[in-house]
Amino acid sequence: MARYDIERLLDDVSALMKASLNTKLAAIQAEKDILLGSDNFNVKQVNDKAWFDSLNEVVTNYDPFIYYGITVNEVTGEQGATAEDVQLFIMVLVADNQADKFIIKRMLRYVRALKEIVQENFDKLQCTSKFRVETVAPQDVKNTESGAYHKMSGIVLQTAIG
C-alpha cells in the first residue's frame, strides 16, 4: 500500500472541497432564504476551474476564486515513528469594489461552508490525527499587478500524517 503523504493529503482535500463547496453553499443559501426572506443576498458559486495553488494572472479571470496550499510542514517523532505536522490553507477571494455592503457576510458564508465540509468529512481523509480547523477573518488583499482589491477569508487545517 502506498504511503499517505502530504501530496496525497493536499489532493484529497482539494478534491473534497471542489466536489462539495457549491452544494454546501446552496444549502446555506436555502437556509438563509428561509430565515431572511427577501432581505437575503446571494453568494456566487465557485467555478470548477477557479482553484489555484499559486497566484498568477489567471486568477483575475475568476470571481470568486480559491487559493490553497501548505503553510507548515514539520516532522516530529523518534526513530522509526515520525509524523508530519501539516497546515493547509484554503482561502476564498472575492472581487471587492468597496460598494458591496454585504461582502463581509458573504465571506462568512464561504468560511462556514469550508468549515462544515471538513467537519462532515473527517473520516474520509487518512490522517494520523483529526483536523483542527481555524477560520481566517475577512481581510483586504490588493493585487499588486492589476491594482484590484479582493476580500479574502478561509480556513487553516492542522493535522498530522505519518
Image: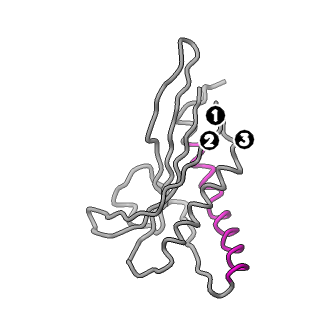
Q: Residues within 10 Å of mark 2 (few under 14, many from 20)?
A: some
25 within the magenta span: yes
Amino acid marked by disc 1: Cys
Residue carrying label 3 = 123
Quarter of the picture containing the C terminus is top right
Label located before the other in sequence (2 or 3):
3
Amino acid marked by disc 2: Phe
Quarter of the picture containing the N terminus is top right
Q: Is residue 125 above or below residue 46?
A: above
Task: Judge from the rendering whether residue 92 lies leftward or rightward of residue 12; answer left or right.
Answer: left
Label 2 and label 3: CA atoms lie apart by 10 Å
Q: Is residue 88 above or below residue 19?
A: above
Looking at the picture, how far across and down is residue 140, in whole percent?
38, 65
At a point 35% along the width and 69% down the height, the residue shown is 149
Amino acid marked by disc 3: Asp
At a point 70% along the width and 68% down the height, the residue shown is 27
Residue carrying label 2 = 131
Q: Secondary structure at mark 2?
A: loop
Looking at the picture, how far across and down is residue 26, in whole percent?
67, 69
At a point 47% along the width and 80% down the height, the residue shown is 101
Q: Which residues are magenta?
A: 11-36
**SS assignment for the magenta stretch, majority:** helix
Residue found at the far bottom of this picture: 38
Label 1 and label 3: CA atoms lie apart by 9 Å
Judged by depth in the image, the label closer to the viewer, 2 or 3, is 2
Query: Cβ–Cβ below 8 Å for labels 1 and 3?
Result: no
Query: Cβ–Cβ below 8 Å for labels 1 and 2?
Result: yes
Q: Residues within 10 Å of mark 1 (few under 14, many from 20)?
A: some
At a point 62% along the width and 26% down the height, the residue shown is 2
Residue carrying label 1 = 127
Q: Is residue 71 above or below residue 21?
A: above
